[in-house]
Amino acid sequence: MSQILKNVTISPEKTLRDALQLINSQALQVALVTDDNQRLLGIITDGDIRRGLLKNLSLDARVTEVMNTSPKTASPSTSKKKLLQLMQQHSILSIPLVKDNILVGLETLKSAQQQSYYKNPVLIMAGGFGTRLKPLTDKCPKPMLKVGNRPLLEIALSNFIQAGFTNFYISTHYMPEQIRAYFGDGSQWNVKINYVHEEKPLGTGGAIGLLPKELPQLPVIVMNGDILTKVDFQLLLKFHHENNADATMCVREYDYQIPYGVISGTGNRITDMVEKPVQRFFVNAGIYVINQDIIKSVSADTYIDMPTLLEKKIADKGQVLMFPIHEYWLDIGRMDDFKQAQVDICAIGFEE
């Protein structure tokens, strides 16, 4: 348990006086009642204590007599944005974070409102030809196609900026001058943008070999430039760190329904029949977090796909993990996807 949690937890045998002293000594305005196994039993605010005193309880009464045994809690994987919405919705100043009934954290209104900033580089892959979107891409690189009123690449950049990232690299190949002319050095967004140019296509992983060698020793987020998503990049980076991953791949659940009845049998004897079964898979979502040792393993001008690069790390017994994303995600590879993006952009609520 972290020191912050230790400072605000109290055992059920303690008194209201003990709880008051704890609340007064901390700035979090709450006491969390836990048992010896760190299971959350309830929470106490100064308002709970006042209401207890008005009911003629003494300060020597146990905290269990006034604690809220059904507090609003959240999973530690809940995004800051969602936590902030919950606190505002329920007019509360903090939310305990609970996993498997165990108290693992506490998010406060103040901390949720604070903007976090990350020095981690972000590489957005924007060099593809967009062949399947012709004729739209005859005179425009696919990441510069407008979804709503903005290029797809600008939407991706804005999502990262809102999450607190400021250090960007954009890989280019097809019509790079359009991308450079539009984004420049990033100063209009108060961020830093550099470019790595592929003289020849290097695959989905080859561009990382063009990154400068003096990058900060931090994991790099890599994303395909043709993706429209609301994924929480802060949670992704937190997951990568907390699990000591060498690489993390975002994955998306994909359902495929077989349009026929599936028959199983032994010899000529039917043993099972399933009508139009649904098979579920995790598919690569085109978003990664990779450590510096993987980046340094790719030589400049080397063609390699990202899955192949990660397969090598897996073969070397590296810690390569998957991060399922449940937020909105769309890979704009075909014309139907592009049309769907035009419909979704307003409904999903991508901020301008």
Image (cartoon, rainbow, N blue to C red):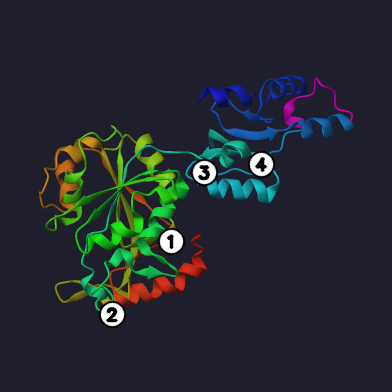
Q: Nearer the viewer, residue 91 or 314?
A: 91
Question: Is residue 12 depicted above or below 138 in this figure?
Answer: above
Q: Residues within 10 Å of mark 4 (few under 14, many from 20)?
A: some
Query: What's drawn in magenta, residue-wise?
Result: 55-65
Q: Is residue 45 left or right of residue 226?
A: right
Query: In the image, which disc is placed on residue 328?
Result: 1
The residue indicated by pointer 3 is: 75
Say which amino acid is labelled 4.
Answer: Pro
The reply to whether discs 2 and 1 touch (Cβ–Cβ < 8 Å) is no
- Looking at the rendered image, the disc whose residue lies closer to the viewer, 1 or 3, is 1
Secondary structure predominantly adopted by residues drawn in magenta = loop
The reply to whether discs 1 and 4 touch (Cβ–Cβ < 8 Å) is no
The residue indicated by pointer 2 is: 260
Labels 2 and 1: the sequence-earlier one:
2
The residue indicated by pointer 4 is: 71
- 56 in magenta: yes
The residues bearing labels 1 and 3 have C-alpha atoms spaced at a distance of 19 Å
Say which amino acid is labelled 2.
Answer: Tyr
